[in-house]
Image (cartoon, helix red, strand yellow):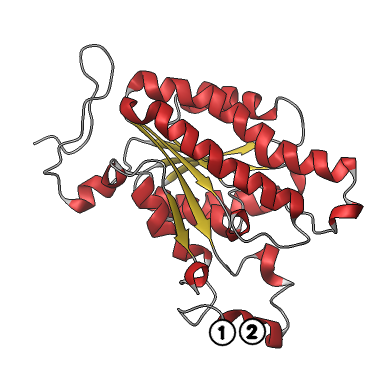
């Protein structure tokens, strides 16, 4: 019984045996996964989770200020017996996504799984948004991801196996008034997911969106530091608590493994029920 796809005579990956056990279908051994923005929070949790399932993880971080955090991710993966490599790329720079893809191919070979997690949000009123802040959010949240998609998606379709996972946000549907640009980029990202899912779905590649709700990350820490505000947010969540980065790992693994082979173009909310409250 074949538990994992193997290349056929033409070099394309053949379909996974649907009779394989669930643990085998969730196994990422032999896969290379690029996680952007993997030095902390959701990206870090996904990187650690994928490495625990056997993936060789490319840990992306922005630059020198984030190097120590990224190194700690690498150290934890290696301490647990996994394999990973560090890759620095400032997505605000033009062409950074293309260069990152080329560097990973040179060092690790092809990429099987791309998790688009890196993004920035700059809170300000719509009438105070500067060109600099607009351009920076567009570059990091959209331009660099597009460059990665252009570089890494065609080889996935040629091999007949690949997973694209965009990390969205509750902002894509329920935008905060001070996140006009950020929320807009997340809505655009969801549109891309749906478009690409139709284009590559029959080629062994899936493209999905994973939308976190209120998650306890460094980005949200300052906003939720006030106990009164935290209680107010928690009261709106049917699950009764804030999420943690680890709450995203199971869903990410499903969507990036053979277990999620028939899930394509989905927008999966991991928000404790906040979206329907």
Residue lying at the far left in this picture: please name it: 1
Which of 203/254 is in front?
A: 203
Using the numbered discs, state the Cα–Cα distance from disc 1 to disc 2 in whole angstroms.
5 Å
Q: Is residue 3 in view? A: yes
Q: Which residue was labeled with disc 2?
A: 232
Q: Is residue 109 left or right of residue 202?
A: right
Front one among 239 and 45: 239
Q: Is residue 51 left or right of residue 191?
A: left
Query: Residue 155: horizontal and vertical position, in percent?
Result: 43, 20
Are the two marked residues, 1 and 2, in contact with CB atoms closer than 8 angstroms?
yes
Q: Estimate how packed mark 2 is, as few (under 14), some (14 to 19) or many (20 or more) residues with alpha carbons within 10 Å.
A: few
Disc 1 secondary structure class: helix
Measuring 69% from the left and 82% from the top, which residue is drawn there?
229
The percent position of residue 12, horizontal first and vertical second, equals 28, 19
- Is residue 109 visible in this depiction of the protein? no
Q: Quadrant of residue 80?
A: bottom left
Residue 56 circle label: none
Residue 174 image position (x, y, % from top left)? 62, 61
Q: Residue at x 41, y 47 (%)?
A: 266
Q: Residues within 10 Å of mark 1 (few under 14, many from 20)?
A: some
Provide residue 84's location: percent of width, then percent of height: 49, 42
Under tag 2, what secondary structure?
helix
Q: Nearer the viewer, residue 78 or 141?
A: 141
Answer above or below: position of 191 versus 268: above
Check residue 235 in the rendering and tell me which mark sits there, or answer none: 1
Q: Residue at x 75, y 57 (%)?
A: 179
Query: Which residue is at a point 62% across and 49% down the rendered structure image?
Result: 70
In the picture, measured across the screen, residue 104 lies left or right of residue 82, that is right
Quadrant of the frame with the N terminus: top left
Q: How many marks?
A: 2
Name the residue furthest top.
10
């Amino acid at each position: 019984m074949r538990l994992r796809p193997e290349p056929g005579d033409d070099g394309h990956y053949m379909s996974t045996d649907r009779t394989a056990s669930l643990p085998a279908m969730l196994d990422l051994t032999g896969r290379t996964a690029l996680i952007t923005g993997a030095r902390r929070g959701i990206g870090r949790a996904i990187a650690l989770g994928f490495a625990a399932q056997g993936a060789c993880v490319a840990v992306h971080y922005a630059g020198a200020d984030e190097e120590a955090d990224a190194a700690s991710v690498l150290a934890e993966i290696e301490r647990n017996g996994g394999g990973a490599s560090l890759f620095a790329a400032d997505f605000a720079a033009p062409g950074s996504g293309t260069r990152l893809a080329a560097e990973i191919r040179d060092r690790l070979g092809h990429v099987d799984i791309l998790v688009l997690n890196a993004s920035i949000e700059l809170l300000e009123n719509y009438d105070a948004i500067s060109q600099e802040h607009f351009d920076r959010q567009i570059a990091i949240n959209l331009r660099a991801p597009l460059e990665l998609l252009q570089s890494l998606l065609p080889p996935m379709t040629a091999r007949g196996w690949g997973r694209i996972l965009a990390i969205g946000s509750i902002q894509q549907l329920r935008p905060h008034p001070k996140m006009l640009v950020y929320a807009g980029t997340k809505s655009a990202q969801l549109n891309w997911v749906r478009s690409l899912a139709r284009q590559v779905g029959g080629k062994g590649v899936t493209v999905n969106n994973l939308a976190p709700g209120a998650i306890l990350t460094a980005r949200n820490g300052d906003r939720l530091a006030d106990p009164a505000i935290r209680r107010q947010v928690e009261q709106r969540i049917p699950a009764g608590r804030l999420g943690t980065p680890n709450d995203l790992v199971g869903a990410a693994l499903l969507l990036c493994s053979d277990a999620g082979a028939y899930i394509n173009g989905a927008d999966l909310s991991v928000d404790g029920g906040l979206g329907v409250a």
